[in-house]
Image: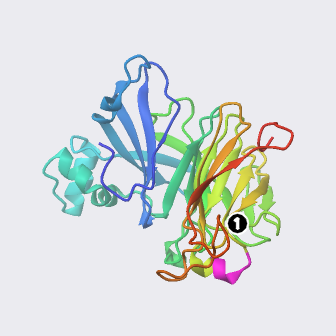
Amino acid sequence: MLGRFAHEGIVFAPAVEGEPLVAYSGDDSRFEYIYKFVSAKPYYKATASGDLLNEGTLYVAHFNDDGTGRWLPLDIENSEFQAKASEAGVGFHSQADVLLNTRLAADVMGATKMDRPEWGAVHPTTKEVYFSLTNNTRRTEVQTNAVNPRAENAYGHIVRWSEGNQQSAESFHWDIFLMGGEAGTRTPSAEGDDLTLTSDNQFACPDGLWFDHRGTLWIQTDMSGELLSEGSFGNNGMYAANPESGELKRFLVGPVDCEITGVVTTPDGKTMFVNVQHPGDRLAPGKFSSSWPAGNGARPRSATVIITREDGGVVGA
């Protein structure tokens, strides 16, 4: 029921007793979509299982330029879906046919084509959803819109939306949380102020997103070899962001030619685990630019880094 497309991952909204289970997923490709699944059956902690994913409705996001949006149902029984499919001259034989051809169904519904939607994260308190749009250098000026405002978008950005107190709602309000780019890149906030990147926190190609229990948003980057070779951003890294103020600080930088991907802490927040993927491995097959973590010319290896504070406190506090 989650649809067939290039799932970069899946993020669940905090489960609420007696309400549907809600999950978000991005299709990691240029001009593809953001999806939401809402289970048909309610969630109960005592009986919850993977069966909740077997029945429900898959939606695709449409972002209006005025900061509002709709979740469009990919449901063969839905009258709007039937009308749009008929108008497009597309026939689906069953709901299974719709789900196996999710991208086509989303095209039919007129969803908003995004700049490579990858990871998502849900704020533990406000329930706002944040999604990374890694990049899209193929978008032309004519193809820009409010939620994808930059042509030849090499640096990516992060969009967020709120569905109020109902994660299963079919409408939402959105804004752009951060624009990636070099020092001087500005992100207009909802209040009209400009959040400007500096040489200390410039970033590109946001990918992994995760909220800790305090509501800090951790952002991980996955710049391509071309951007890494330019040298203006340094290596891929991880950043800590304050969702309320937009304040952004660089937290760590990975080894050469790696991707930083995946982060979690212990429940007390005092030990952090961060994954370093394919270090030194973006030149050519069999040619490495790093020997991390062993050093001394060894073959580079992916690894998990464990981070603690010297004073034993909460990481990132």
Task: Report whether residue 66 is seen.
Answer: no
Q: Which residue is mark 1?
A: 203
Give me the residue at 66% from left, 72% from top: 256
- Residues packed near mark 1 inside 10 Å, few (<14), some (14 to 19) or many (20 plus): many
The correct choice, above or below, for 182 with respect to 220 in the image is below
Towards the viewer: 3 or 140: 3
The quarter in which the C terminus is drawn is top right
Give the residues in magenta. 228-232
Give me the residue at 62% from left, 38% from top: 123
Q: Is residue 168 left or right of residue 87?
A: right
Give me the residue at 51% from left, 35% from top: 13
Q: Amino acid at mark 1?
A: Phe
Residue 215, given in percent of the width and then of the height, sits at 70, 38
- Choose top left, top right, bottom left or bottom right for residue 250: bottom right
Q: Is residue 268 left or right of residue 281?
A: right
- Choose top left, top right, bottom left or bottom right for residue 23: top left
Residue 268, given in percent of the width and then of the height, sits at 71, 31
Q: Secondary structure at mark 1?
A: loop
Residue 75, given in percent of the width and then of the height, sits at 26, 43
Residue 39, given in percent of the width and then of the height, sits at 35, 32
